[in-house]
Amino acid sequence: MMTRMSEQTFARRLYLGIIAATGVWCALILAAPLLAKTAPAFSDGCYRFFSQVCHQLDGRSFHFGGQKFAVCIRCASIYFSFLAAIILLPFAIHPAKVRAPSPIIIGAMFLPMAMDAGLHVLGIHSSSTISRMVTGTLGGIALACLLVPLFLETALHLKTNLKNKKVFYATKTG
């Protein structure tokens, strides 16, 4: 007789999947400059892919080997801090018990990025590399604290509802 996956095992596997997917995303950001000379078609594909989510301005991007990252400094800071936060989160709390922080805390973490970008657009303040890195890092941590718990909670809720309704589960016959 097969036993169904426990809620904790399900949450752990889902959590590892989120880490893996985010790791691949971040690896592609680095692959663009790293493979620019050895695999230019792949590198160009990475740049085209990320151009859908980032302006990729050369002067606002980290560089490696003379090539810019596939995303700007703020985006890179968001993505890499998101990855770091989700890797470190289980050391603070078990993935099945993670809950999203209050909207006030999330808003407070996004406020510096909104102010930095907004004041720059208005010409009141000029964003710097440091301000983009710091505000992007806060935003990435905030996203990890918000999205990962919501995703895990939703997936666990769906799994429980599907299990209770016996939907999508096959039984062995004969």
Image (cartoon, rainbow, N blue to C red):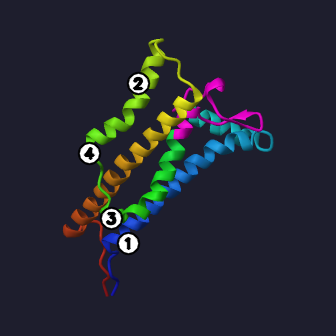
* Residue type (three-letter) at the residue carrying disc 2: Met
Closer to the chain start, of discs 3 and 4, is 3
The answer to whether 171 appears left or right of 52 in the picture is left
Q: Earlier in the sequence, mark 4 or mark 2?
A: 4
Circle on res. 102: 4
Residue placed under numbered mark 3 in the picture: 96
Q: Which residue is mark 1?
A: 9
**CA neighbours of label 1 inside 10 A, class few (<14), some (14 to 19), many (20+):** few
How many residues crowd around disc 3 within 10 Å: few (fewer than 14), some, or many (20 or more)? some
Query: Can you name the residue that lies furthest to the left here?
Result: 165
The residue sitting at 38% across, 52% down in the picture is 148
First-in-chain label (3 vs 2): 3
Q: Which residue sits at x=44%, y=18%?
A: 119
Q: What residue is disc 2 on?
A: 115
Q: Depth check: 44 or 97 in front?
A: 97
Mark-to-mark CA distance, 4 and 2:
20 Å
Q: State the SS at label 1.
A: helix
Q: CA distance from mark 1 to mark 3?
A: 9 Å
> What is the magenta range?
52-77
| Quadrant in which the N terminus appears | bottom left
Q: Marks 3/4: CA distance?
A: 18 Å
Q: Amino acid at mark 3?
A: Ala
Residue at the image point whose x is 44% and y is 40% from the top: 138
Point out the frontmost of discs 1 and 3: 3
User: Disc 3 or disc 4, which is closer to the eye?
Assistant: 4
Name the quadrant containing residue 158.
Answer: bottom left
Query: Three-letter amino acid code at disc 4?
Result: Ser
* 54 and 79: which is toward the camera: 79
Q: Earlier in the sequence, mark 1 or mark 3?
A: 1
Name the amino acid, label 1. Answer: Thr
